[in-house]
Image (cartoon, rainbow, N blue to C red):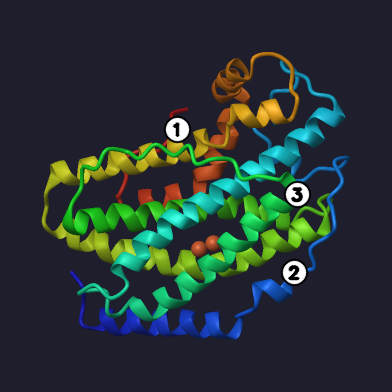
Amino acid sequence: MMTTEEPNRLRAMIAKLSGLSIRDRYNPYQTFKWPEALADEQMWMSADLLTTHGTESDMPLDEAQRQRLSRWESINFYSLNVHGIRELLAEVVLRIHAPGYEDFSPFMHHFIGEENDHMWFFAEFCLRYGGKLYPNRNVNFGQRFSGRALDLVTFAKIQLFEEIVDHFNMRVAGDSSIHPFIRELNGVHHRDESRHIAFGREMVLWLYEQISREGDEALLAQIDEYLRGYMVNSVTQLYNPIVYQDALLPGNVYERRTALLQHPARRGAHRAIVRKPESFLLKHAMISKPVFAD
Ligand SMILES: [Fe+2]
Ligand SMILES: [Fe+2]
């Protein structure tokens, strides 16, 4: 049950996050000093974030292959960001002034503005240094929800997307072996996302309380399964056969993808990628079990 203090607490939290957005506002078109080029002979993302990490005793890579892979996996990661942001923006724009969202809409304006900036700088990175965006391979899960339940799964997916991305941003931003410009881009995104994640968690809990009060166990079970499926899908998308092809890795790239996805050494990485949002959802009983079995 929402107590009488609850709407006040929520409004205060949203006012605080909006104030932080105003304080930290930057012009993305002026903030970054884009290097003319980024050399191939370096790591573009942290070695322990690569989809091959931990598997090299079975599937060895030389240094040049690892560096090329880091370049194309980072272009794939930023491309996934661009597609994910475009899709989440559409959903937030649809709801910003819908009835019931009055308390949330002030921050949604900041959210939309900031995400447009992110979509621009991630796309700019891909086009400047990769010459392309990887196409959107996202299969839209069948539409099973409606009304408030649809709102819940929509905002929960946004939340999961942002928390999963943040796992990568934080690691790269703090990795002194990575080019300072790449670290800066990841660090700026992480700073904005810390506000979005705080907001998103409140929003998801607010929606979940409304749904769970109705006590429709079958619906709650569907939501549980759907959210766990979404997390599995998010991890799976990191393994892109075209990336392995662009990195000139030998052999059949589809077979490589399957072998890597199923490699026992990758299980720890998969669990780490979803750890934070998974524990949030488990804590609030929105999911019934961990995403990846032991
Ligand atoms: Fe973002
Ligand atoms: Fe965000």
Mark earlier in primary sequence (2, 1): 2
Please tell me the numbered disc located at residue 292.
1
> Ligand 1, what quadrant?
bottom right
Q: Which structural element holds mark 2?
A: loop
Q: Give the mark toward the camera: 2 or 3.
A: 3
Would residue 24 be found to the left or right of residue 175 on screen? left
The residue located at (81%, 43%) in the rendering is: 43
Amino acid type indicated by mark 2? Phe
Q: Is residue 52 visible?
A: no
| Residue to which mark 2 is pinned | 32
Mark earlier in primary sequence (2, 3): 2
Q: Give above or below for 245 relative to 191.
A: above
Amino acid type indicated by mark 3? Tyr
The picture places residue 188, in percent across and down from the top left corner, at 66, 67
Please tell me the numbered disc located at residue 159.
none
Amino acid type indicated by mark 1? Phe
Q: CA distance from mark 1 to mark 3?
A: 34 Å
Would residue 293 be found to the left or right of residue 258 on screen? left
| Residue to which mark 3 is pinned | 129
Q: Give the mark toward the camera: 1 or 3.
A: 3
Q: Give above or below for 255 relative to 134.
A: above
The residue located at (34%, 77%) in the rendering is: 105
Please state which of residues 212 and 234 is positioned toward the viewer in this rendering: 234
